[in-house]
Amino acid sequence: MKILFIGGTGTISMAITGQLSSDSNYELFLLNRGNRTSELSENVHTITADISDESDCNEKLKDLTFDVVCDFIAFKLEQVERDYRLFKDKTKQYMYISSASAYQKPLASHIITESTPLANPYWQYSRDKIACEEFLMKMYRENGFPITIIRPSHTYDERKVPLGVHGNKGSYQVIRRMLEGKPVIIHGDGTSLWTMTHNTDFAKGFIGLMGNIHAIGEAFQITSDESLTWNQIYQSIADALGVELHACHVPSYLLAAAKQYDFKGSLLGDKAHSVIFDNTKLKRAVPGFTATTRFDQGIRQTIAYILSHKECQVLDPEFDDWCDKVINTFEQTKLFLS
């Protein structure tokens, strides 16, 4: 099977790239700007290009056709419109990475299936993903463009600790606060349910949908079946660090009002809601699919990697100061009300 990934070296895609490159049944091409090529197997073919330069990509791809094309870095309508022009006659399957955050907010039911309505008034990111999905499905219905839509939820790898509240420079500053014995912010009361999926588990479901005739014209969510509260998530991280968790619970609507950080979309439009993903449709299309990495096990691997790789330890003093101010203000308010 001949495959082209646009991107292919990110949190979600790197595990897929790794699994495919070790299987002789697949011939894998990556089209990207070459930022992580040193980590790729020699079996992976690279096309160095910026996908936003349509004419250059068209020239570099003119003699190539593929069984599967997947764009991991398309977020806006004009980007999938470009992909349609580039690949409408070059692939038997185009796989689009959408987002589970596109599902209806507020939720009518905490049980999420692929038929859950798509609507998110809180987050432009999610509305853009919905617009991309609608265009691609229109191209499938009207022109036979062989689309498969993938909706990941919160997927993590060895380089990134998945959190509900963090700054613009990633999650490491929260880890540093835990190591220093400082309190960390958990949105809400920490009891809402969430799902964390390790990227190696996501890869198994994704690969099972590649070249799958039952996937054409369909949307699939790929997540773990494990549900955790945010309190359990943060406790698992603290346990992996070998420290005591000091949590400060702050209502999501207050965090969403912060001027320094955009938590409205990521919390009110996503993580503040209890969700349980029903992966029945995926398991029908990919018999035997099971997510096997339990969060407390996967996060230990992530913490170990980050603590042993300095490049993953990006400090964010601005966010650290902001946390201190929010926590101090909130604790004083609680004392005043008590």
Image (cartoon, grey):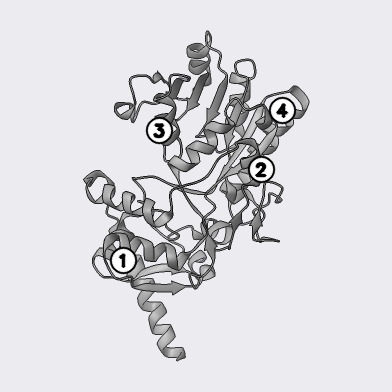
Q: Earlier in the sequence, mark 3 or mark 4?
A: 3
Q: Residues within 10 Å of mark 2 (few under 14, many from 20)?
A: some
Residue mark closest to the camera, 3 vs 4: 3
- Alpha carbon separation for disc pair 3 and 4: 28 Å
Of the numbered discs 1 and 2, the one sitting upstream in the chain is 2
Say if mark 3 contacts mark 2, CB within 8 Å. no
Q: Residues within 10 Å of mark 4 (few under 14, many from 20)?
A: some
**Residue 217 got which mark?**
none
User: Residue 171, percent across and down?
Assistant: 36, 54
Label drawn at residue 321: 1
Q: Amino acid at mark 4?
A: Met
Residue under numbered circle 4: 139
Which residue is most to the top?
63
Report the residue marked by disc 3.
Answer: 9
Q: Is residue 159 above or below residue 1?
A: below
Q: Inspect this view and state whether residue 60 appears.
A: yes
Question: Which secondary structure lies at badge 1?
Answer: helix
Instruction: Give 253 or 295, whichever is nearer the viewer.
Output: 295
Q: Amino acid at mark 2?
A: Lys
Q: Residue at x 60, y 36 (%)?
A: 286
Q: Nearer the viewer, mark 3 or mark 2?
A: 2
